[in-house]
Image (tube, grey):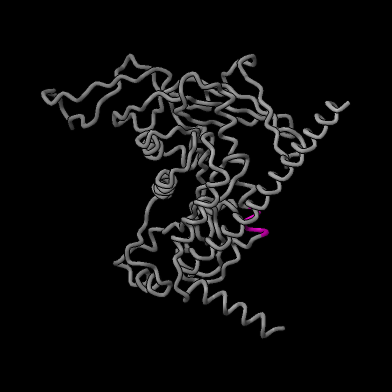
């Protein structure tokens, strides 16, 4: 028995690291097959990342960085992921390994040595996570994956360049932002530096906010000022929840103020403020930005953001049941192939659920037709 187990492990290691096969081609066929069953014009693309805690320093791209699964900075790898939600099903669309800056320093002999030992390709370099996220969205767009919005948490949503990247791609979004994010309630007006201006000291380099323009405020201050009667009520029901998730929300049109000291102005967006009652009776406030149309109902935008719920369920199944975080190899190729094989297993299980749902709907249709025929014969 022991020899068979060892042989199986060796075979898996060879499959992950030595055997030649087209990982990208297999991933593309997986996406095509999954989209054939779940493609939905009302679909949602969900951006997130997940951590893989590691004890040693020799696994590819491991570094001390924030690990979401641990809730703190620790030794780990990070995978940036895109999940597709459509037709009532959610599945991992893509996941790529984040390359820390410490793994992309050609002047550091230790870094060069570690890249060589883990077989990292020479053309793989450090990119910000939000840049990787935009690359994954471009992949979905290239595949023709139908969707109505991109959703992401505050780590991504609070980054102006990420939101701008979505705007440049004409993508609608609902993204989280942090409570200390500042906004203008009115469109800010700036005065350009006058090159002919004569004054002592260093000349102004950036546009200046006119003095009559109200200063920006933190969105947390706006959350405290919402009148009790302004909150809209929403219940989100899902099969895996014992009871509906009760949410209250309100929306305001605002102008993000990030970078305003350098004269950077931003497009008008929705600020969505959500509150939930905690177990102790206190309220917890959350904040989101959205570029949805001005006539979009507040609760519809909130409902869209909560499609992120599927991420938590998906990661739990991928890690606890399918072994996503059980990879013990160290190489770049091994990690990426392991992730693909786990995602393929998830896709297979999802397709089985889809078929079961179709059979249930078919049986209900037959039962309904039988009752109709029975009543007609009487």
Which secondary structure is most common in the magenta stretch? helix
Figure check: 229 above or below 120: above
Placement of 325 over or under 173, stated as above or below: below
Q: Quadrant of the C terminus?
A: top right
Would you say 90 lies left or right of 186 here? right
Report x, y in % for residue 272. Answer: 53, 26
Q: How many numbered discs, if any?
A: 0
Which corner quadrant holds the N terminus?
Answer: bottom right
Farthest-out residue, bottom: 3
Identified at 44% across, 60% down, the residue is 24
Highlighted magenta segment, given as a residue range: 316-321
Vertically, is 309 above or below 219? below
Which of 296/98 is in front? Answer: 296
Looking at the picture, how far across and down is residue 52, in whole percent?
55, 60
Residue ID at (46%, 55%): 28
In the image, is residue 123 part of the stretch drawn in magenta? no
Relative depth, front residue between 333 and 263: 333
Residue 65 appears left or right of 347: left
Instruction: Write the residue at 42% across / 48% down.
Output: 139
Residue that lies at the very extreme toward the right in this rendered image: 378
- State the image quarter where residue 241 is shown: top right
Residue 2, percent from left and from top: 69, 84
Q: Could you say which quadrant of the image residue 262 lies in?
A: top left
Q: Could one spot residue 177 in this view of the protein?
A: no
Q: Residue 119, how many percent across, how many down?
A: 40, 72
Please indicate whether residue 308 sits to the left or right of residue 24 in the image: right
Q: Does 193 sit left or right of 13 as displayed?
A: left
Q: Quadrant of residue 367?
A: top right
Determine the residue positioned at 15% across, 27% down.
Answer: 200
């Amino acid at each position: 028995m022991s020899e068979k187990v060892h042989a199986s492990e060796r075979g898996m290691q060879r499959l992950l690291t030595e055997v030649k096969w087209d990982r990208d081609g297999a991933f593309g066929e997986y996406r095509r097959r999954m989209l054939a069953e779940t493609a939905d014009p009302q679909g949602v693309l969900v951006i997130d990342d997940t951590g893989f805690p590691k004890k040693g320093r020799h696994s590819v791209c491991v570094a001390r960085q924030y690990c979401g699964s641990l809730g703190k900075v620790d030794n780990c790898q990070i995978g940036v992921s895109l999940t597709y939600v459509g037709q009532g099903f959610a599945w991992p669309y893509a996941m790529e390994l984040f390359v820390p800056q410490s793994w992309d320093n050609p002047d550091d002999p230790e870094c060069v040595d570690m890249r060589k030992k883990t077989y990292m390709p020479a053309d793989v370099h450090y990119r910000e996570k939000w840049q990787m996220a935009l690359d994954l969205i471009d992949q979905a767009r290239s595949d023709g994956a139908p969707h109505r919005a991109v959703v992401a948490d505050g780590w991504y949503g609070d980054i102006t360049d990420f939101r701008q990247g979505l705007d440049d791609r004409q993508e609608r979004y609902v993204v989280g932002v942090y409570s200390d994010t500042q906004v203008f309630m009115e469109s800010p007006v700036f005065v350009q530096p006058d090159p002919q201006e004569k004054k002592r000291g260093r000349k102004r380099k950036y546009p200046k906010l006119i003095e009559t323009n109200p200063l920006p405020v933190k969105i947390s201050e706006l959350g405290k000022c919402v009148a009790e009667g302004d909150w809209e009520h929403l219940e989100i029901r899902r099969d895996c929840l014992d009871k509906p998730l009760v949410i209250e929300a309100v929306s305001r049109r605002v102008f993000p103020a990030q970078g305003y000291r350098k004269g950077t102005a931003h497009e008008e967006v929705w600020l969505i403020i959500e509150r939930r009652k905690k177990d102790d009776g206190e309220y917890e406030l959350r904040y989101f930005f959205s570029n949805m149309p001005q006539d979009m109902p507040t609760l519809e935008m909130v409902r869209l953001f909560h499609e992120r719920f599927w991420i938590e369920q998906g990661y739990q199944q991928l890690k606890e049941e399918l072994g996503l975080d059980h990879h013990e190899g160290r190489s770049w190729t091994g990690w990426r192939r392991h992730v693909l094989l786990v995602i393929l297993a998830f896709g297979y299980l999802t397709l089985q659920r889809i078929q079961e749902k179709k059979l249930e709907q078919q049986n209900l249709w037959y039962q309904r037709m039988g009752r109709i025929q029975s009543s007609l014969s009487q």
